[in-house]
Amino acid sequence: MARGKLILIEGLDRTGKSTQAAKLVESLSNQARLVKFPERSTPIGKLINQYLKESETHLADQAIHLLFSANRWEVAETIKATLLEGRDVVMDRYVYSGIAYSAAKAVPGMDVQWCAQPEKGLLKPDLTFFLTNSESELRKGFGDERYESSGFQTKVRHEFETIFKNYESQDYKNNHIVFLDTTGKSIEQVHTSVGSAVEEYIQKNSDVEEFMYF
Ligand code: DGP
Ligand code: NA
Ligand code: NA
């Protein structure tokens, strides 16, 4: 039996990432599994949740960075097991959010390379969607968690753009990353674009069994 595909919906806030990830899982046939990061239900996830929700929770920037990464490592084995069962896995955020949000803090020494280090060895998605929107979309409203202010989001946007332009090899980008501008598009329109790119990818790569790693 062929292994499942690892598909990531990543991108800027307020681009409808979570909605698209959920809709994609529904539309995939082989008992696809949705994995949202941060996964807030684990012991480490509970610490992350507290950090995001309570502004008085102090953690060093390096420490929370490593916790976000550890949260991905906590779930890594079960993701691989699910793929080996032949089921697709759709992730809502992953390594790229990990790097972009921490690098956006501009803490001395915490550059993109430092931030990427603890992610080394995690499974690389077969297909990554990077959803973008116009800057004005970003200003339309935020929740009240830690990172949800327009000043910080602008920095995150810049880091994501740097990462996707420079960090990955051209070959990986060309074959495995889809850039999708959601500005002015309905949920259904974006879903249709995502769905057809996934279908095309699966058709071309149905026999690929080896995994890629960060
Ligand atoms: P979400 O549950 O998708 O709204 O994500 C919660 C917040 O945490 C959001 O502002 C994005 C941020 N975030 C997600 N993953 C990471 C990560 O790995 N590192 C850091 N520093 N922030 C992250
Ligand atoms: Na979200
Ligand atoms: Na959020």
Image: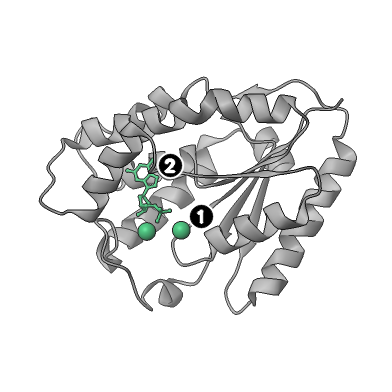
Mark 2 or 1, which is nearer the eye?
2
The reply to whether residue 214 is visible in this rendering is no
Question: Where is residue 197 shown, x and y percent of the image?
Answer: 78, 53
Question: Where is residue 96 shown, x and y percent of the image?
Answer: 47, 41
Question: Where is residue 186 shown, x and y percent of the image?
Answer: 64, 77
Q: Is residue 144 above or below residue 2?
A: below
Identify which amino acid the numbered label 1 is placed on. Answer: Gly
Within 8 Å of ligand 1, the CB of disc 2? no
Dot 2 falls on a residue whose secondary structure is loop
Q: Is residue 208 left or right of residue 22?
A: right
The reply to whether residue 29 is visible in this rendering is yes
Ligand 3: image quarter: bottom left
Give whichever of 156, 1 is nearer the camera: 1
Residue 39 has which mark?
2
Within 8 Å of ligand 2, the CB of disc 1? no
Residue 44 falls in which quadrant of the image?
top left
Residue 136 falls in which quadrant of the image?
bottom left
Residue 11 has which mark?
1
Q: Is residue 192 left or right of residue 166?
A: right
Comes first in the chain, label 2 or label 1: 1
**Few, some or many C-alpha atoms within 10 Å of disc 2 (few <14, some 14-19, many ≥20)?**
some
Q: Is residue 147 above or below residue 109?
A: below
Give whichever of 98, 176 is nearer the camera: 98
Q: Which residue is at 30% across, 35% downward?
A: 65
